[in-house]
Image (cartoon, rainbow, N blue to C red):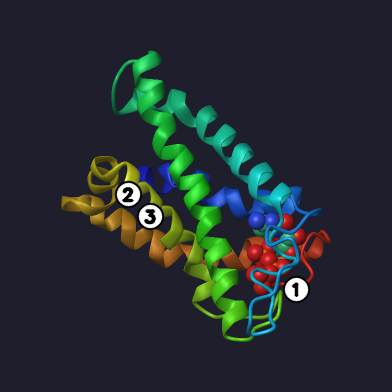
Amino acid sequence: MLLAFWLFIPAYVANPLAVVWGGGVPMDFGRRLRDGRRLLGDGKTWRGFFGGGLSAVLVGALQWPSSALWSAPLNLESFSSWIGPVMALAFGSLLGDVLGSFIKRRVGIQRGGKAPVLDQYDFVIGAFLLTGALFSGWLLTHYILNEAIFGLILIIVLTPILHRVVNIIGYRIGKKEVPW
Ligand code: CTP
Ligand code: MG
C-alpha cells in the first residue's frame, strides 16, 4: 500500500505544481462555446499545464533510485521503464483536471466554483485512465491485481483529505483564490 502511494506521487504533485507555475495564456485562449461559457476558463493555463507536468516528471525521475528496493538494478533499461508511467501519471493527472474544468463550465459552474467529487477525483481518474491506456501492465501490477487493489483503495480514501490540506495551504500562501 505504501508503494502504491509512493508511485502515485507524480500524479499528486502535478496539480499543486501547476498552481505554482500557473498564469499567462489560458489553454482555451479565451474561447467560448455555444452555451456562452468558456471552454475551460482562466484557471487552466499552458504555463500551469507544462510547468506542472514537467516538474512532476522531474519529481518522479528523482524517485527512480528507490525502485532498486523492489525491482531491477539501476540501469538505463530500468529508468526507461520507470519514466513512462511517471509521465503518464503526471500528464494524466493534469488532463483529468482540465477535463474536470471542462465539465464544470458545461454545467455552469464558474472558475473556482465548487464541484464536490469532481474537484477531488478528476485528476485521479485522469492519471489512472492515461496510465492504463499506455502502460496497462504496470497499472494492473501496482493497483489492480491481487493485494495491489488495496493500494487503489488507499488512494481513493486518502485523496480527499490530501486535496483539502493542500488547497488550504495554497489559499493561505495566496496561490489559490479559494480554499477548495
Ligand atoms: N492552474 C493553471 N493551469 C492549470 C491548472 C491550474 O494555471 N493547468 C492554476 C490557475 O492559476 C488556477 C490555479 O492553478 O486558478 C488553481 O487550479 P484549479 O483549482 O484547478 O483551478 P480553478 O481556478 O479552481 O478553476 P476551475 O474551476 O476550472 O477548477
Ligand atoms: Mg478549482
- Placement of 17 over or under 28, stated as above or below: above
* CB of mark 1 near ligand 1 (< 8 Å): yes
- Placement of 8 over or under 166, stated as above or below: above
Q: Label 3 is placed on what type of residue?
A: Phe
Q: Secondary structure at mark 1?
A: loop
The label on residue 133 is: 2
Name the mark nearer the viewer: 1 or 3: 3
Residue with the most extreme left position: 146
Name the mark nearer the viewer: 2 or 1: 2
Instruction: Give the residue pinned by disc 3.
Output: 128
In the image, 108: left or right of 178?
left
**Which residue does the image show at 49% across and 31% down from the upper left?**
63
- Placement of 175 over or under 40, stated as above or below: above
Instruction: Give the residue pinned by disc 1.
Output: 178
Image coordinates of residue 71 in percent, x first then y, are: 28, 25
Q: Earlier in the sequence, mark 2 or mark 1?
A: 2
Q: CA gap, disc 2 to disc 3?
A: 8 Å
Q: CA gap, disc 2 to disc 1?
A: 33 Å
Q: Secondary structure at mark 2?
A: helix
